[in-house]
Image: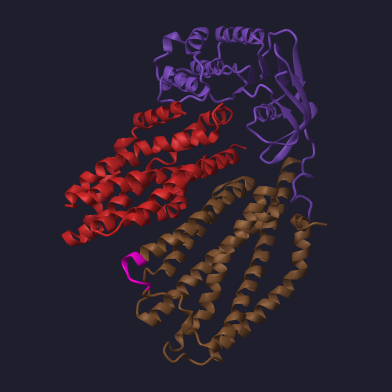
C-alpha cells in the first residue's frame, strides 16, 4: 500500500473546500482525479503530498517518498538542462540522470539553458525530475501540459513502466487516460457546499 | 468551562461590550487624578525644577511600551499553539499602541533630557534601546500590512514577534555594552529614580495604573475593530459567492 | 545539501548578483562615507572600523530576497519541502551559499582596505576575524527575514526594514571588537559575543525560517 487517505478534509486559503475523501493507492495502480477547473484537484494532490495541511482525517504514507509534479517545472532559467537535473539528482541522491535523459529523449538539449527551450521541452525536463526522484509514488497535476502527441505517448510509456515497477500514480488531467483499470475519483462528490460555518467570523453578530 | 471560551469572536464581542464603558471611565478617572496630582499638586524638586514632572508621562509610557511587546509575545504564542483568532487579533491590535507608547517614551525622554542636560538627544542606553524597540514595532506592523491572507499574516508575524523578542533583549545588552564601552558609566541615564521625591511616588503609581488601564481599553477597542473587519470580510465573501 | 550550496552559488554568479555585486557595493560604501563627512584623516580613521562593518552589513542585504524567491517562483520550494532533505538543512545550505558570495568575499578584502587606513597588524587581524565570525550571522538572520517575505510583491523593500534591527547586536559587538583592537584595548568580551551570537543564529535561524516557509506555502 503506497498511500491511503481516510475521511480527509482539505483546505485552501484556510477554508475547507473538500471533505470526506477516502483513497487507497496500491502498487501498480493509477487513480485519476476528474473535475472541472477549481474543483480542488490541485489542492487534493498537494494535501496528499504533504505540502498543504488538512483539518480532518488522516493520510498514511508508509513509503514516505513522494514526488509531486505541479504546474511549474521547478527549473532554473539560467542553468542548463543538465545542471538542473544534476541539482535534483543531488537532492534525491540518485544516479538516474542518464536514464532520465534517454527515456525522455533529452539528449540533444542537455546542455542548453532552460530559458532557450520551448514550453514542451521545459515540461519534459520537469517530468525528468520524476524519474530522478526514485519515488514509488507520483502525484501528477496536469503532466501533459504543453506536450505534443509524440511526447504525450512517450510519457504514457514511462508511466506504464513506472506502474509495472510497482509504482503508483495519482493524476489530475483533462486529457484522456489511456490505461486500463483506472480508478476515477469524481471531485464533485467531495465538494464542501456551505463552508461559511467554518469561518469563525461568519454569522457571529 | 475553560478560559478558551473567550476565544470565540461572538463571546469576545459581547464581553467587551459589557466591560468597555466601565474600563473607559476607570481609565479616565485614573489618568485625570494621577496627572493632575502629579503635575499640579506636587512640590517642585529643588534641583530639577518642574521639568522632572514629565516622568508622570515618561515612566508609565515606557512601562506600557515594553509590556505591550510581551502581551504581543504571549498572544502570538497562543495563536501558534491553539490557533485562536482572537489571540492573533489582540497581538495585531496591541502593536500600534506599543508603537505610540514607545514614541511617547522617547519624546518625553528627550524633553526631560533637554531640561536637565541641555541637549535633546543623547545616545544613552535607555533612549537608544527605546529607539530600537520602536524599530521592532515598525517592522512588526509593516509585516502585518504586507501579507494578504490574514491567517498567514498572523502566522508570520507571530514568528517575527518570537524571534524579535530574543533579539530585542539581546540588543538591550548590546546597547548597554556599546554605551559603557565608550564612557565610564551612563552619563545621561534617565534611570536614576533616587532623585525622585517621595511625594511623587503615589501619583506616579496612579499614573502607571492609569496607563495600563488605558492600554487595556485601547486594546479592547482595537480588537473589536479588527473582529468587525473580519466579519465584514466574511459577509462580503458570502455575498460574492452566492 | 551540498547540491543546494553549489547550485545557489552558481546561480548567483551567473545572474551577476554574486561576489562582484557585493564587493562593488561594499567599496561604494567605503568610498561614500568619507566623501560625505569630509577628508579629515583623524575623523575618518576613528570611524573606519564602523564603516567596514556597516559596509559588510549593507552589502549583505543586497541579494537576500533572492534566497527563497527564485525557488518559490518556479515551484522548487514546494518540491524541496517534500524532498528527503529536511527543510532546515535546505535553509542552512542556502544561507551558507549567501554568506559565501557576500560575507566571505567582504571578509577577505576588508583587511586590504584596512591596510589603506594604516591600521596596525593587530587591528587588521581582528578586522578579518571579527568579520569572518560575524558575517555568517548576517546571512542567517537575513535568510530568516527572507523566509518571512517570500512571494510578496513589495518584498524587496520590506525585507531591510524588517531585518535590520536584528542585525544590531552583531553590528555592535563586531564593530566594537575592531574599535577596541584599534585602540589597543581588550577585545575578549566583544569578540566572544560576536562569535556567540553567530553560533546561536546559525543553529536556530534555520528552524525559524523553515517554519515560516511552511506557513507561506500553506
Q: Chain A shown in which color? A: purple
> Residues in magenta?
B180-186
Q: Is residue B23 above or below residue C15?
A: below
Is A185 placed above or below B52 here? above
> Which chain is in red here?
C
B5 on left or right of A2: right
What is the x, y in percent for residue C139?
41, 43
Give the residue displayed 67% in from the left and 48% down from the top. Answer: B81
Question: Could you tell me residue B13's position as x and y percent?
Answer: 75, 61
Q: Indicate the position of residue C92 as horizontal and vertical percent values.
A: 47, 36
Q: Which chain is brown?
A: B
Find residue B208 and report its image quarter. bottom right
- Which is more toward the observer, C131 or B6? C131
Q: Quick check: A8 above or below B236?
A: above
The answer, for residue C153, to whether it is visible in the render is no
Q: Is residue C187 magenta?
A: no
Amino acid at each position: 500500500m503506497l498511500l491511503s487517505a481516510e475521511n480527509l478534509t482539505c483546505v485552501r486559503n484556510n477554508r475547507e473546500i473538500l471533505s470526506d475523501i477516502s483513497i487507497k493507492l496500491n502498487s501498480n495502480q493509477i487513480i485519476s482525479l476528474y473535475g472541472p477547473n477549481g474543483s480542488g484537484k490541485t489542492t487534493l494532490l498537494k494535501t496528499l503530498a504533504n505540502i498543504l495541511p488538512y483539518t480532518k482525517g488522516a493520510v498514511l504514507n508508509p513509503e514516505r517518498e513522494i514526488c509531486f509534479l505541479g504546474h511549474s517545472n521547478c527549473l532554473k532559467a539560467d542553468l542548463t538542462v543538465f545542471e538542473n537535473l544534476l541539482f535534483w539528482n543531488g537532492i534525491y541522491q540518485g544516479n538516474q540522470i542518464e536514464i532520465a535523459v534517454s527515456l525522455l529523449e533529452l539528449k540533444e538539449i542537455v546542455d542548453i539553458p532552460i530559458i532557450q527551450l520551448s514550453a514542451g521541452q521545459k515540461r519534459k525536463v520537469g517530468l525528468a525530475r520524476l524519474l530522478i526522484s526514485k519515488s514509488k509514488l507520483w502525484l501528477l497535476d496536469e503532466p501533459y501540459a504543453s506536450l505534443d502527441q509524440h511526447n504525450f505517448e512517450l510519457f504514457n510509456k514511462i508511466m506504464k513502466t513506472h506502474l509495472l515497477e510497482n509504482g503508483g500514480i495519482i493524476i489530475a488531467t483533462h486529457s484522456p487516460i489511456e490505461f486500463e483499470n483506472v480508478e476515477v475519483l469524481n471531485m464533485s462528490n467531495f465538494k464542501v457546499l456551505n463552508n461559511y460555518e467554518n469561518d469563525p467570523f461568519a454569522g457571529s453578530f | 468551562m475553560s478560559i478558551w471560551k473567550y476565544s470565540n469572536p461572538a463571546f469576545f464581542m459581547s464581553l467587551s461590550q459589557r466591560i468597555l464603558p466601565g474600563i473607559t471611565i476607570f481609565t479616565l478617572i485614573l489618568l485625570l487624578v494621577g496627572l493632575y496630582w502629579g503635575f499640579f499638586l506636587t512640590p517642585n524638586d529643588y534641583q530639577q525644577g518642574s521639568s522632572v514632572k514629565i516622568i508622570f508621562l515618561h515612566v508609565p509610557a515606557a512601562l506600557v511600551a515594553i509590556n505591550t511587546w510581551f502581551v504581543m509575545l504571549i498572544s502570538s504564542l497562543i495563536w501558534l499553539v491553539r490557533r485562536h483568532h482572537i489571540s492573533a487579533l489582540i497581538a495585531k491590535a496591541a502593536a500600534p499602541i506599543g508603537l505610540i507608547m514607545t514614541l511617547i517614551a522617547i519624546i518625553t525622554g528627550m524633553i526631560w533630557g533637554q531640561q536637565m542636560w541641555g541637549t535633546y538627544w543623547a545616545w544613552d542606553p535607555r533612549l537608544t534601546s527605546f529607539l530600537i524597540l520602536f524599530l521592532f514595532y515598525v517592522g512588526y506592523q509593516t509585516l502585518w500590512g504586507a501579507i494578504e491572507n490574514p491567517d498567514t499574516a498572523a502566522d508570520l508575524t507571530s514568528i517575527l514577534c518570537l524571534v524579535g523578542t530574543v533579539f530585542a533583549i539581546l540588543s538591550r545588552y548590546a546597547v548597554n555594552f556599546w554605551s559603557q564601552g565608550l564612557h565610564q558609566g551612563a552619563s545621561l541615564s534617565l534611570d536614576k529614580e533616587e532623585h525622585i521625591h517621595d511625594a511623587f511616588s503615589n501619583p506616579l503609581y496612579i499614573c502607571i495604573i492609569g496607563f495600563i488601564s488605558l492600554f487595556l481599553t485601547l486594546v479592547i477597542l482595537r480588537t473589536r475593530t479588527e473582529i468587525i473587519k473580519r466579519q465584514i470580510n466574511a459577509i462580503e465573501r458570502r455575498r460574492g459567492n452566492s | 545539501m551540498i547540491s543546494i550550496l553549489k547550485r545557489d552559488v552558481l546561480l548567483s554568479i551567473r545572474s551577476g548578483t554574486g561576489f562582484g555585486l557585493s564587493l562593488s557595493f561594499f567599496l561604494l560604501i567605503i568610498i561614500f562615507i568619507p566623501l560625505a563627512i569630509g577628508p579629515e584623516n583623524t575623523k575618518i580613521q576613528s570611524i573606519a572600523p564602523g564603516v567596514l562593518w556597516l559596509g559588510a552589513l549593507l552589502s549583505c542585504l543586497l541579494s537576500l530576497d533572492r534566497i527563497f524567491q527564485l525557488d518559490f517562483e518556479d515551484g522548487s520550494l514546494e518540491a524541496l519541502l517534500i524532498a528527503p532533505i529536511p527543510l532546515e538543512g535546505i535553509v542552512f545550505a542556502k544561507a551558507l551559499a549567501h554568506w559565501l558570495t557576500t560575507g566571505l568575499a567582504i571578509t577577505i578584502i576588508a583587511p586590504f582596505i584596512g591596510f589603506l587606513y594604516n591600521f596596525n597588524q593587530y587591528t587588521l587581524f581582528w578586522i578579518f576575524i571579527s568579520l569572518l565570525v560575524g558575517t555568517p550571522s548576517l546571512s542567517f538572520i537575513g535568510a530568516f527575514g527572507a523566509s518571512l517575505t517570500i512571494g510578496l510583491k513589495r518584498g524587496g523593500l520590506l525585507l531591510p526594514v524588517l531585518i535590520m534591527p536584528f542585525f544590531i547586536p552583531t553590528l555592535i559587538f563586531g564593530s566594537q571588537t575592531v574599535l577596541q583592537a584599534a585602540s589597543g584595548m581588550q577585545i575578549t568580551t566583544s569578540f566572544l559575543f560576536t562569535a556567540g551570537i553567530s553560533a546561536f543564529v546559525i543553529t536556530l535561524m534555520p528552524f525559524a525560517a523553515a517554519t515560516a516557509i511552511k506557513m507561506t506555502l500553506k
